Amino acid sequence: MRDERLLERLSRRAPGEWELYVKTAESRELASTAESRSERLRREQGWAARFWEGGAPRFASACGEAELERALSRAARTPTAPAEPPEWPGGRTAGQDTPALKPPEPPPELFEEVSRRVSAESRGEASLTELTVRRGASLERIRNARGLDVSIVTERLDGFACAAGRRGARACEARAVFRWEDGPEAEALARRLADRATLPLADRRAPFPIGEWLLDPSVASALLAAAAPLFTGFPLPAWVARERLFSPRVTIVDDAAADAPWDGEGTPTRRVVVVEEGVFRTPLRDLRSARRSGEEPTGHGVRPSYRTPPAPLPRRLFFEGGRESPRELLSSVRRGLFASALTAPASLDLEADRYDVEFTGVEVLAGRAQGPVGGARASGRLSELFRRISAVSTDRQFFPTPHMTGAPTLLIERAAFE
Amino acid sequence: MDLDPSAVSRWIAPLGLRPGEIAEVFVERRRETHLFFRDGEVTEARVGLSAGVSARRRLGREERLAFVSRADEGGAHEAVRALSEMVGLSPLPAKPARGRAAEEEEDSSAPVERWRRRLAAALARHAPRHRFRWTLREVTRQVIPAGAPASSFSRRLVSLEGEFIAASRRGDEPRGFSFHAPDSEATADELKTALALAAVPRERPTPCAGGETDVVLAGGSAAVLFHEILSHPLESEAPLLSRWKETRLSVSDLEVKDDPTRLDLFGGYERDDEGTRPRAVKLLDAGRLAGSPGDRFRAGGGASNGHARRAEASDPPLVRGSNLLVAAGQATGEEMARRLSDGLWIEEIAGGSVELSSGQFRLRFPRARRVRRGKMAEETGAGIVLGETIPALRGVESGMGRDVRVCRSLGWCARAGQVVPVQGAAPDVLIRKLLVRSST
């Protein structure tokens, strides 16, 4: 095999304590605006090695085998404090029948269709300014000193879109990131963009200081993604009471079995119940955090890029269950705000138990939508926000944040608005 | 670089023959070393060696780019071949030119070791309890345009980012610190000084009061404001500013320029990513909108001012700002505080953003100082400065500070998913009637 020399070098440098990761990827991207069009083809190979030479952790990455050998040598030269190596998984060999990577087809041309729909959804107040759609395929192979050899093939259709809303002298921008799992969803994308680009154009601010808070799935998933470090980082902040972190109506699960059979370290993917009926049950662990805590890895060693070592991160995190339809949730609101979209990234201070969320949406009185609220802000204690989730709907949607995060419409029984 | 520019130039030439056609091959080699420091020890060493070559052709509003992750002649051949197929030209013969050479580039780890020792000493003295990531980025780029000579250029950039525990008058407190600079003989000393300053004991901050207030952006932090409200709209040709061309928008002593030729700053470069030698561009001249950054496409038949920048070889070049410089005035710090009278004195901005269609901007600051009756008063905690571009420019008061300071905490700027090094330097600037609010 071509890379035998590299494997031999790793074995010599760090006997029993190494891992080699190779990624081959190809993608085609189409970026369109009303006046321009840009096509991009990318063929990429990435190599990465983690190894514990002299008991100290080191990481090297490169775009080729020869370059990785040089990077290994350089990484080994810096004196580094020793640390426990992980308990490497072993026992699976899939290397003999490594699947081949199929070059992806060009992405679909959707600018005109999405543009037409954005205009229709917003009654002409918003226009699509940019749409980038990318279709890509990648093959990842992970081997380690214990004889593990697994391969993962991934295909993806994703991108982002921008729209601008204008009403008189007021203007607003909207940006939506998407990953389509069952083909293009132009209509849903256009609706999101139209709402985000036009609702903030309303003059009205939050009409009352306290009320119920209904969260659109996109807003709820942004909050869940921002809170996700609680599920991977330890020690937990002092305010976290594991027995009562969320309201009893909340169950949160991470299950990426449909995406890949292994994580970025070769640990099998499995369903992990992170929060069960409000109680924090199982944190998400990669190999190193599992070793530190003396627990089993959960299959959450994630590599955002071949250039960074795996880290404990969610893979497909979502709210589970939910009984009521979104319409039932809406009709149960006596006086509150429906948060349709965020107008700034959600700000969560996990140490200090604070959140601060700026959003745009609609006022709701006696179960009926009253009128748009251009900009509002909700802030307070995270611990209270989590425990005040009074209803979870059935309309779960997934959003790339960048890992896939799924949330339905949520109802918070009380929040403070500005 | 492991390729023959004349051969690559011949391959790309057919893609740049028509009038208005821009075509080039772009090659990048990047070496990144990261050391993770925790309480006096290096806990992890990471080294990344990446390389890539892309071939690009632009004609009018149509652009195509093909990228492969190897920076040798074989890679260049593959990229040009793929691009030729994308534009419908007969592709180059499949047989590659020279393959990947078993090169042995200069691979000294001496600079890393020197930095490790210096940092360990500086951290032990000024911030013994810490979590920092130190990064050395060594980037070499080469541009081979169709029908023009090739050019190559290199940069070595150092960053230190993280958090440390500092003493405050009422106990310890975590403080963020970030420093970005080109690697030079003087960089380590400058970093040490910045670290010592950041670790100075302070009062415990009171919560930042919200509402409309006057603000002095000090310590070079005004560069972040003008980066957001001038650089971004002008590089994007946003209608927000283009309709005010040559209109006086601010006081006559406000001069702002974008200068990539300042190689002592993090955003400097000798050639842009189309191979053009860059020029400084005046963005605001005597308070009036003046020039704007550009690239070969915007220059039409004329000369580009050299602001085409790529985050990586796999990205197409975008028009981007580099180093934002504000001209000095005559005022001392005491005069600025006296003129501010009552308001906020902000020395550090942790991040900023602007919405191009509305011109609304926000700047996050980790702490500030309240000024009362022209005197420095209590420390306040983190907050956000909010405003709109045109009113903020009109709110700048005549009489800038006399000392221009480099804003070393400003180091990276993201647009359209592409992150490029930037920086800025500015004197103290007084701006009336900005909205400030406390942040979590």
Image: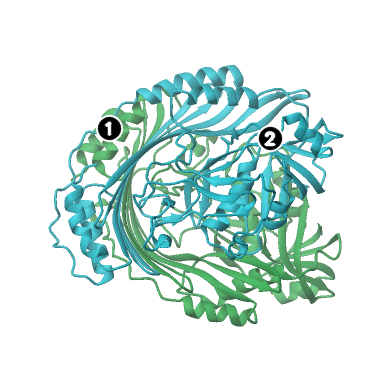
- Label 2 crowd (10 A; few <14 / some 14-19 / many >=20): many
Q: Is residue A113 left or right of residue B229?
A: left
Q: Amino acid at mark 1?
A: Ser
Q: In the image, residue B123 lies at what x, y percent?
A: 56, 21
Colouring of the image: by chain
Which chain is disc 1 placed on? A
Residue hosting label 1: A11
For the C terminus of chain A, the quadrant is bottom right
The disc label shown at residue B401, or none: 2
Q: In the image, residue B106 lies at what x, y percent?
A: 27, 30
Display colour for chain A: green
For this rendering, which residue is in front, B275 or B377? B275
Q: How many marks?
A: 2
Q: Are marks 1 and 2 in contact (CB under 8 Å)?
A: no
Chain for colour cyan: B
Residue B120 in view of the camera:
yes
Which chain is disc 2 placed on? B
Residue B393 drawn above or below residue A27? above
Q: In the image, residue B303 lies at what x, y percent?
A: 38, 55
Residue A395 location, quadrant? bottom right
Q: In the image, residue A209 lies at what x, y percent?
A: 86, 59
Front: mark 1 or 2: 2
Q: Is residue B373 left or right of residue A109?
A: right
The disc label shown at residue B308, or none: none
Q: Is residue B147 left or right of residue A175?
A: left
Residue A84 in view of the camera:
no
Q: Residue at x 73, y 30 (%)?
A: B333
Q: Is residue B167 left or right of residue A119?
A: right
Q: Amino acid at mark 2?
A: Gly
For the N terminus of chain A, the quadrant is top left
Report, in whole angstroms, how far the alpha carbon at label 1 lies from the one at label 2. 60 Å
